[in-house]
Structures are given as structure tokens and as C-alpha cells.
Image: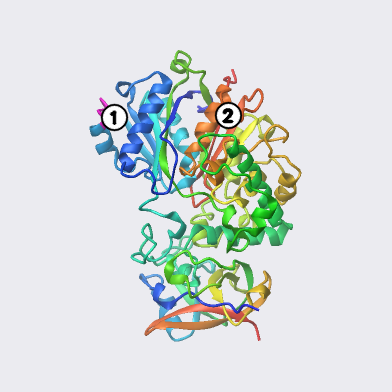
């Protein structure tokens, strides 16, 4: 049994721009919001200047409960940087969010034996506060 | 208007291939100059003939301005670089052909010089100024949606795509091992190869896991060195030292929503577990007027072993999802396979010069001078990437179509 760890918080630094800031501001409040085009209702991640489908710019920030399914993942065993030596193994996962037209959010899995990670497993979002005002998504098996 | 057979590769040259850091105290710029001079010598041409540079991924180790000044190129009439990274390797020669067919230049150099002593790509998406991440990029608003999960290197990211391919199609580690071992067997016969020791299936499964399902041997090498190729118009090519390798077809790009690919993970569901090459392959075959059945040898960009399998599918050598069993059946082996792959030993075992060694090998196969020569090789496929847009490919041929 090898419990999944998390990459070190010191390596995470958020640099929001005008388009991603509402996402990270909500994350700091432990709320998941996904931008949805006000014109054609297409969701998009990461948040960006234009709707890739209709090129409109205005969005609604739609709350999501953070429940999803693992679309793909890897188990990182080798620390590619010295700073990762105490953090392996960890499990970066691509999680598909239902009700968003296939939007995916990427986060590390926690609360899981690395052997048990599976594509298709149901997961729920766990906010990880890396420092004051900076919070990133991780996931754990759905309760 | 088509580029088909309008230009030909007439010269190839390289420095020795070095393990990472062993090329010091030479500079990347110096390696670039040496490779160009070797390629010109091979073609029977001189610097005075050069009037164009068609590049990808900052291949000179510097800018054209300084390179032309230092090397004494009489007049630069064309200098352009494909956007992106290693995806443009094969396409840089296509860019050279485009420059020639349009009349903008007559003798064009494509070149990659790499010195990983100072730039290790393995952690290229890690935060900057962290020890061991010299090449690393500063955080970006887009990268913030990937990197906090711990995805900091391309190998980890391609591992994610590979897991999806395994999930959808039953691809196994044994299939990846066949790519690795067949490539090593090719490398073992070549003096230029960095890895010449036998590699067994037991060795493969005993290797340390890096990012599941990719182990040490699924990763390409870290190298220094430079490779250059010279492209001229088809008519002129016939009068030079070696038989021309005609640019039968070339394409670069990809679906817009393939986009940044591994560094955003939002690619369309139907091509997530692919190499991103499908639209480029389709345009390549359209320009060629033929398909994969006409290819005698395939030099497929192999930064990570599973990407060979995915490209075999995307270029139509086998149906999508059947790449694993296709390689397991021995199809990519030199001498015995239906489509020999990476006869030079690839990025995995010969040397990693960001794909330019694949172009060199294609030319040698077409000339009939390759170390692991494919009998009567008339058409060679070269690919760049898989990567973010653009990916690219190139079809070199011994004879023009008409």
C-alpha cells in the first residue's frame, strides 16, 4: 500500500490574468466556477478571452459541485526535480466534469492508494490551500 | 500548385552525437556551424550557395542574424521558423521546399543544434529557478491549470495520454517494450549510437518506473549535437553529388482544438489518445497521391515509445487502437517487418537531436547508404512531434512521380 502524496506547495505559483482571476478568486473561497459563454452556452477551461465555438467574449460563472470522473491519469514515481524527492509517488489526474460539455480539470488525486487509481472512477474536488489566497483543486474518491 | 517533387534534399551533415553535456566546451552555435558545413560538403555545395534558412524550435542555438554574419552567408533571402517545438522537425524541410518552390530562395538549410548541458527538457514545465529545472518556463495563466497537479515534464504528460490509450484499446507495456527493444536493436549496429548494449524484455521490466506506464527506457535520451540538411530545387538537385531525396509531400499544423495538447489536456475526446497527427497525415497523403502502403521505411519521432504506436495508427499503417498488437506482431522490425521503423535507433537509442536525426536517416535510406538499409527503399516517411501544434511530416522519395 502506497498512499498518493501531493506535489510540494512551494512549486505552485498562481499568476492569474484578467480571464482566469475569477476562477482563482472563487477557488480561494473553495468554490468551483466554470465560465460559460453567454451567447452559445459553451463551457470552457481554462478560462480564456474568447469562446472557441462562437468567439463571443462575455461569460457567466457557473457554480459546479466538483464531482467528476477520472478521464486519464499517471502515477509519478520518479522525482524529475530534487524538490519533488519527498513528494513521490503522486497522481496527476485529468477529471471530466459532468454537465460542462466535456470540460476537464486537472488535479492530483489524494486519499487513495496509488494502485487503486482508475480511469472512470468517480471523484470529488478537495480544495488545497497552498498559501494565503492561493488555492488549487485536488480530487479524492467520491464519498 | 503543389509542392510535390519541386525540391529535394541533397546534403546531410552532423556533429558527433554526445551524451548530455559532453559537447562542451563547444557552443550550440558552433555545433550548428559545423553541421551546416558538413551538410554542404556532403552536397558538394558551399556557404556561398546558401540563401535561406528554414528552421523549427530555435534550432540554430541563436538567431539567423548572428549565424549569417559569423558564417559569412552572402545574402539571406529567406529565413523563417515554424512555431512550436519538436513538432516542426520534419516540417522544417517542408518549409525549405516551400521557400524554393515559391522562388524566394534557392538553397536552404534546415538545422537543429542542441546542447542539454544547460537545458534539460525533462522538467521543462516546472517552475523557473528551481534547482534542476534550468530550461523551465515561468508560470502562465494557462499552465496554472496543469502544473499544480504536478505535471511538470513532457514524459509525465505523455504518460497520461498513454494511460488513456491503454484504457480504450488494451495497449500493454509489452507493446511499448517492443518499440523500445526493436529500436535498440537498430541502434546496436550503428557506430553513431549512444546506446549500443543489448536490451532484453527482462531489462525493460526491471527498469525504474518514471511516470506510469512509462519507465526509464520509454524515454528518449538527453543529448548534445547538431544535424543539418540542405534542400535545393529538383532540377539543380540532379546535378549534385548524391542522388536527390525528393520532397514528395510535406505538411504541418493540426486541428486547432488539439492546440497546446499535453499542456492543457482538453483535446477533443475522439483524438485525445492520439499523436495529434491525423489531419497532417491526411494532407500528406493527399499531396503525395499515395498512402501508407507506398512507404518503405518510417522514421517516427520517438521522444516517448508509445508515440510510435499512436503515429502508426494516425498515419494509417494500422487501424486506430490496433497499434499495440501491430508492433507486437513484429511489423516494425528491420528486415522482417512490414514497415521498418526508426532504423537509425531513433531518439530512444541513437541520439536525441529533436528529430533531425530522423531526417538524416530518411535521406540515407533513399540514397541506399543507411547502416540498416531497407532493401530498395524508394519512399521514406519522417515525422516531427507529437506535440502541441504544429506537428509535421515529410515524405522523401528516390524518384519524382512524373
Residue lying at 54% horizontally and 27% vertically, measured from the top left: B364
Residue A97, position in %: x, y?
Answer: 60, 73
**Is residue B92 or residue A3 the one in the foreground?**
A3
Q: Tell me if residue B275 comes above or below residue A79 in the rendering.
A: above
Residue A46 magenta:
no
Q: Which residue is mark 2?
A: B371
Q: Dot 1, crowdedness within 10 Å: few (<14), some or many (≥20)?
A: some
Prevailing secondary structure of the magenta residues = loop
Asked whether B151 or A95 is in front, the reply is: B151
Look at the image and tell me whether residue B299 can be seen: no
Q: Is residue A75 left or right of residue A84?
A: right
Image position of B187 with respect to A129: above or below: above
Task: Please rate how many residues cluster around mark 2, counting C-alpha atoms within 10 Å: few if below 14, some from 14 to 19, many from 20.
Answer: some
Magenta span: B71-75
Label of residue B53 in the image: none
Which chain is indicated by disc 2?
A: B
Q: Position of residue B390 (x, y in %)?
A: 48, 47
What is the quadrant of the C terminus of chain B in the image?
A: top right
Q: CA distance from mark 2 to mark 1?
A: 35 Å
Which residue is found at the position 59% from the left and 34% from the top?
B189
Residue B349 vs residue A118: left or right?
A: left
Q: Residue B210 placed where, x, y %?
A: 56, 62
Q: Chain of mark 1?
A: B
> Position of B187 compared to B334: left or right?
left
Instruction: Indicate the secondary structure of the residue bearing disc 1.
Output: loop
Q: Judging from the image, what secondary structure is the residue with disc 2 in?
A: loop
Query: In x, y percent, where is residue B37?
Result: 35, 27
- Residue shown at 69%/52% (left/top)? B201
Q: Which residue is mark 1?
A: B76
Amino acid at each position: 500500500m502506497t498512499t498518493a502524496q501531493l506535489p510540494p506547495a512551494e512549486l505552485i505559483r498562481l499568476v492569474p490574468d484578467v480571464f482566469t482571476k475569477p476562477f482563482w478568486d472563487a477557488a480561494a473561497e473553495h468554490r468551483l466556477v466554470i465560465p460559460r459563454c453567454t451567447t452559445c452556452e459553451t463551457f470552457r477551461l481554462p478560462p480564456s478571452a474568447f469562446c472557441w465555438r462562437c468567439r463571443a467574449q462575455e461569460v457567466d460563472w457557473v457554480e459546479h459541485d466538483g464531482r467528476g470522473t477520472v478521464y486519464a491519469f499517471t502515477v509519478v514515481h520518479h522525482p524529475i526535480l530534487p524538490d519533488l524527492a519527498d513528494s513521490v509517488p503522486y497522481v496527476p489526474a485529468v477529471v471530466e466534469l459532468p454537465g460542462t460539455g466535456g470540460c476537464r480539470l486537472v488535479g492530483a488525486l489524494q486519499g487513495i492508494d496509488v494502485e487503486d487509481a482508475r480511469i472512470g472512477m468517480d471523484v470529488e474536488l478537495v480544495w488545497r490551500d497552498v498559501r494565503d489566497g492561493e488555492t488549487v483543486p485536488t480530487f479524492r474518491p467520491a464519498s | 500548385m503543389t509542392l510535390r517533387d519541386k525540391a529535394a534534399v541533397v546534403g546531410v551533415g552532423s556533429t558527433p552525437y554526445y551524451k548530455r553535456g559532453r559537447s562542451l566546451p563547444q557552443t550550440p552555435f558552433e555545433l550548428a556551424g559545423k553541421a551546416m558545413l558538413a551538410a554542404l560538403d556532403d552536397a558538394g555545395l558551399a556557404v556561398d550557395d546558401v540563401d535561406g534558412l528554414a528552421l523549427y524550435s530555435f534550432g540554430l542555438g541563436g538567431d539567423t542574424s548572428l549565424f549569417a554574419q559569423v558564417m559569412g552567408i552572402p545574402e539571406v533571402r529567406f529565413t523563417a521558423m515554424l512555431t512550436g517545438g519538436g513538432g516542426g522537425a520534419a516540417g522544417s524541410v517542408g518549409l525549405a521546399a516551400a521557400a524554393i518552390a515559391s522562388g524566394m530562395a534557392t538553397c536552404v538549410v534546415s538545422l537543429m543544434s542542441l546542447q542539454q548541458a544547460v537545458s534539460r527538457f525533462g522538467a521543462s514545465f516546472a517552475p523557473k529557478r528551481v534547482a534542476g529545472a534550468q530550461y523551465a518556463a515561468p508560470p502562465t495563466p494557462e499552465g496554472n491549470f496543469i502544473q499544480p497537479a504536478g505535471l511538470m515534464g513532457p514524459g509525465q504528460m505523455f504518460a497520461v495520454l498513454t494511460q488513456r490509450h491503454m484504457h480504450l484499446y488494451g495497449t500493454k507495456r509489452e507493446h511499448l517494450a517492443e518499440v523500445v527493444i526493436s529500436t535498440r536493436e537498430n541502434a546496436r549496429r550503428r557506430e553513431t549510437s549512444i546506446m549500443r548494449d543489448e536490451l532484453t524484455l527482462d531489462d525493460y521490466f526491471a527498469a525504474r518506473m518514471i511516470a506510469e506506464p512509462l519507465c526509464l527506457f520509454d524515454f528518449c535520451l538527453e543529448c548534445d549535437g547538431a544535424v543539418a540538411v540542405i534542400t535545393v530545387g529538383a532540377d539543380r538537385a540532379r546535378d549534385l553529388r548524391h542522388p536527390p531525396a525528393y520532397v514528395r509531400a510535406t505538411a504541418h499544423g493540426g486541428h486547432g482544438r488539439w492546440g497546446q495538447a499535453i499542456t492543457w489536456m482538453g483535446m477533443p475526446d475522439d483524438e485525445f489518445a492520439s499523436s495529434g497527427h491525423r489531419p497532417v497525415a491526411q494532407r500528406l497523403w493527399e499531396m503525395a497521391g499515395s498512402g501508407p502502403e507506398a512507404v518503405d521505411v518510417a522514421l517516427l519521432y520517438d521522444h516517448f515509445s508509445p508515440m510510435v504506436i499512436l503515429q502508426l495508427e494516425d498515419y494509417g499503417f494500422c487501424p486506430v487502437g490496433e497499434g499495440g498488437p501491430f508492433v507486437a506482431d513484429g511489423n516494425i522490425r528491420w528486415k522482417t517487418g512490414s514497415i521498418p521503423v526508426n532504423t537509425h535507433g531513433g531518439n530512444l537509442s541513437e541520439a536525441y537531436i529533436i528529430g533531425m536525426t530522423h531526417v538524416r536517416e530518411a535521406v540515407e535510406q533513399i540514397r541506399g547508404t543507411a547502416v540498416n538499409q531497407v532493401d530498395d527503399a524508394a519512399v521514406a516517411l519522417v515525422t516531427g512531434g507529437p506535440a502541441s501544434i504544429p506537428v509535421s511530416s515529410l515524405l522523401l522519395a528516390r524518384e519524382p512521380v512524373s
